[in-house]
Image: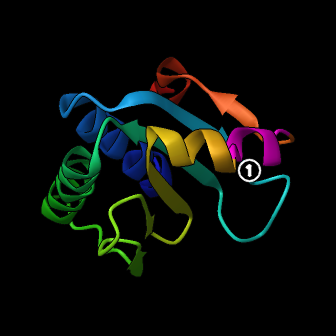
């Protein structure tokens, strides 16, 4: 498995382990050069949004993947974690509906967990 797909798989598992809602993986590699994948997930409240980000950071850090930057951690409403070719968006439910990244990036391809295993 290549490094980018490993990051996606580990991040998705970390999010699901902490009960993230509606975890979505978009392959945006044919749409933009800013990243290959977006991972979008929701938490029910600010505490869960922070816990989700912490879990992703811990799991990826243990695997040797270092984030380039993190935004929104202080507000805990929309945390963006940049791992180079993978950008992780963790929203509270209300803000996810408002910003609707899935609609904005609808030209990207939704990726299932099974596709990440290949």
Above/below status of 69 relative to 94? below
Which residue is found at the position 70% from the left and 71% from the top?
34
Residue furthest to the bottom in view is 68
Which residue is found at the position 39% from the left and 27% from the top?
21
Range of magenta residues: 100-106
Rendered image quadrant of residue 77: bottom left
Above/below status of 65 relative to 17? below
Which residue is found at the position 19% from the left and 65% from the top?
61
Which of 49 and 54 lies nearest the eye of the viewer? 49
Residue furthest to the top in view is 114
Which residue is found at the position 85% from the left and 55% from the top?
31
Colour scheme of the rendered structure: rainbow
Q: Position of residue 44 (x, y in %)?
A: 32, 35
Q: Position of residue 80 (x, y in %)?
A: 46, 65
* Relative side of 30 to 110, left or right: right
* Relative side of 20 to 108, left or right: left
Q: Position of residue 116 (x, y in %)?
A: 50, 31
- Asked which secondary structure carries label 1, the reply is loop
Above/below status of 39 relative to 60? above
Which of 96 and 70 lies nearest the eye of the viewer? 96
Residue at which label 1 appears: 28
Q: Position of residue 52 (x, y in %)?
A: 25, 48
* Relative side of 89 to 9, left or right: right
Residue 1 visible in the current orientation: no
Residue 91 visible in the current orientation: yes
* The N terminus - image quarter: top left
Which of 25 and 76 lies nearest the eye of the viewer? 76
Label 1 neighbour load within 10 Å: few <14, some 14-19, many 20+: many
Does the magenta portion include 118? no
């Amino acid at each position: 498995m290549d490094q980018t797909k490993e990051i996606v798989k580990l991040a998705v598992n970390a999010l699901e382990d902490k009960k993230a809602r509606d975890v979505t993986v978009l392959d945006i590699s044919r749409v933009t050069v800013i990243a290959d994948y977006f991972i979008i997930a929701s938490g029910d409240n600010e505490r869960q949004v922070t816990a989700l980000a912490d879990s992703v950071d811990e799991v990826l850090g243990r695997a040797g993947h270092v984030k380039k930057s993190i935004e929104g951690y202080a507000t805990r409403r929309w945390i963006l974690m940049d791992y180079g070719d993978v950008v992780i968006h963790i929203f509270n439910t209300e803000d996810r509906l408002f910003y609707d990244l899935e609609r904005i990036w609808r030209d990207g391809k939704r990726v299932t967990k099974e596709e990440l295993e290949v």
